Amino acid sequence: MKAHTIVLAGNGSYSNRGCEAILRGTTTLLRSQLGECRFISNYFPTPGSHDEENEIDPLIIHRPFPLLKKYSLAWFEEQITRKVFQKPYDFIRVTRTFRHSLRDADAVLMLGGDNFSLDYPNSDVHFGLCRLAIEADVPVVIWGASIGPFDNNPPYEQWAVKELSKVNLICARETATLQYLAGNGITKNVILSADPAFFLQPSSLELPTNIEKALVDGCIGLNLSPLLNRFMKISGIHSNLSAWIKVASEIVSSLLSHLSLPILLVPHVTSEVGYISRDDYLFLYQVAKMLNEPERIFILNPNLNSSQTKWVISQVRVFAGARTHSTLAAISTCVPTICIGYSMKARGIAKDVYGHLDWLISGQDLVNDPDALQDRLDKLLSQEDEIRLQLRQINPVMLQRARTAAHKVANIIEDCGVDE
């Protein structure tokens, strides 16, 4: 029997450990349902990314979408097309790459987690990829996704609802997405799933002696990202990154003052070319440098892959994270976790996992009160055993949701006759 060829489209580079976690969890899930599979990864690379060179799975073929060099002629053309004519990001070049992959595809899975939303500027591109797959008569699944809300732009929402109703299947990773879609009349092609990163397997490794000791003694794992700077205001005006570094240092200082545990800073998204606005490590390094507490604050090596990072997170006593997949790495290994969120995905995941929003805190709340995270972590520690038990009970539920969604995808492929 010929191995299935599945296109995984719309993801980001492995420098985002969440994107890597999504892809590796997805390949594990689909192979469990379909047997041997070959995957073509059509993703949006970041400058300097080396995904293909670092790939550990020989059956994943990397076909990144073109990355335009800033200030090149093509870059200026794209800027004009997007800003003046309101056309999607560099769609001609994206189309060429994607059509190449569609020739061999038995199905297309749209990855990325929250690409179909207004949180980022290029959702049109992802809708466009869905249309191309439909036109090529290739089954298309929006996989493990948070979708919307689009209600801040009613005309766009009406258009998006029509587009979403055309795909073969939407696997919603939280109940909030399911409810949002149902509220817009989309129910027939929707199933409740879970984020595929629940299936990412942790991989142990040797760590520096000081970090190893902190993990053994019990420490707080913490992820803060430069991305949060975009979603908050400081002193009544839109913040800049320097101001956010200062606030972040006040947050960590509060933890040091009120809690006796050491703190492990965990980068989850990095930049190959040193953009601090995209790089958790560079951002957290500045926070640690400002505080100058080397005996109590440690920072994880930025070169770990998603499985290694997940293993380290699994070893901390409690965790708080701004990057969604840093919190999923903790939750899926039963580490009591606080989600620092700014969007529906954080609220939806926290509600599905805990049944309430007590362990969700907004970035703006942290700006308003740098002690807010310390207060919440103190309460989390007081209920540590109870929460670990709750996570042990909910994780099998999440895993089964993801398996059910993968089984549904397998049925769609088989119904389209790819086994003939």
Image: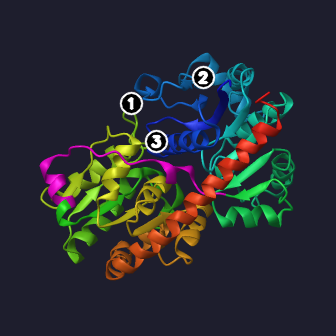
The residue drawn where x is 50% and y is 56% is 324
CA–CA distance in space, label 1 to label 2: 17 Å
Magenta-drawn segment: 193-215
Q: Which label's residue is closer to the chain start, 3 or 1?
A: 3
Pick the residue in front: 401 or 315. 401
Q: Secondary structure at mark 1?
A: loop
Residue at the disc numbered 2: 66
**Mark in front: 2 vs 3:** 3
- Residue 310, x across and y down, in percent: 38, 51
**Residue 16 got which mark?**
3
The residue drawn where x is 82% and y is 32% is 417
Judged left or right of residue 184, residue 269 is left
**Disc 3 marks which amino acid?**
Asn
- Count residues near mark 1 (Cα–Cα under 10 Å), then give few for <14, some for 14-19, many for 20+: few
Labels 2 & 3 near each other (Cβ < 8 A): no
Judged left or right of residue 117, residue 268 is left
Residue at the disc numbered 1: 273
- Residue 218, x across and y down, in percent: 22, 66
- Residue 4, x across and y down, in percent: 67, 29
